[in-house]
Image: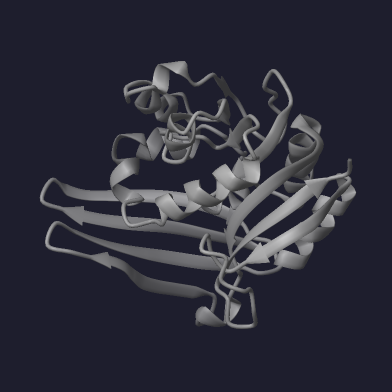
Amino acid sequence: MPAFDASAYGRGIADIYDATVRGLPTDQAVDLLHELADGGPVLEFGIGTGRLALPLAARGLEVAGIDGSAEMVEVLRGKPGGDRVPVTIGDFSTATADGSYALVVLAANTVYALPSQDAQVACFRNAAAHLRPGGRFVIEAWVPDPAAFRDGSALRLLLMTEDAVVAEAAVLSPAGQHMHTTRIRLTAEGVRLLPANHRYAWPAELDLMARLASMEREHRWSDWARTPFGDDSRAHVSVYRRSA
């Protein structure tokens, strides 16, 4: 594995990031997060361009963020209300923000951007350190599926519209629970290659990380619509609560 650079992903994708996340259930996510915050302040790890943070702020919540990419935050700053959201630039597994929060959010599989189990454990501890007693940490992530790979590799079509075709090539390293991917985005403007590394973790492994940080799982659903989590679930939204 190359040395971890918290800014690398955002530096390579910031200018088109919003186009790549169109179609995600943003409204459902914002509805649920607003409810879980219960009127309290929200801190988003990996705040990016503000897909979740800005709608939450528009609903009257106090919102702050931590992100490794100055380029992503620059896009956030250019949006209405983006200049009013305080953001710390840094690795969200260790960087800190002022204040204490009712809710810390880590969405869109971003926990897997951290390069090791140790870094993910540190992230849970950092989330707990930012939470008020009884506060919640919410993670959205896909469920690992090694069976989707043949001889350790996979190629899949992610999107096909009149304007864009997006495919993903992936190589699995199961001994370290790493997946190396490159997304290939084809549009009228040309071809973009978007590489990313993932250190994936099983839901039960994340539960143990929460317990090490003095948090207990409160909910787990398959999606932001609160579909029950089960054997066939390919993703999860997990809610952990800090001890009161």
**Side (left or right) of 232 relative to 209:** left
Q: Is residue 1 visible?
A: no
Residue at 48% across / 30% down in the picture?
57
Name which quarter of the figure residue 231 lies in.
bottom right
Residue 122, percent across and down? 78, 40
Q: Is residue 164 above or below residue 62?
A: below
Residue at 68% across / 26% down in the picture?
95
Residue at 44% across / 74% down in the picture?
154
**Observer-nearest of 155 and 163:** 163
Quadrant where the C terminus sits is top right
**Observer-nearest of 127 and 154:** 127
**Side (left or right) of 94 relative to 25:** right
Residue 64, percent across and down? 57, 26
Residue 168, percent across and down? 37, 64
Residue 6, percent across and down? 57, 34
Q: Is residue 83 visible?
A: yes
Name which quarter of the figure residue 207 lies in.
bottom right
**Observer-nearest of 159 and 84:** 84
**Side (left or right) of 41 relative to 127:** left
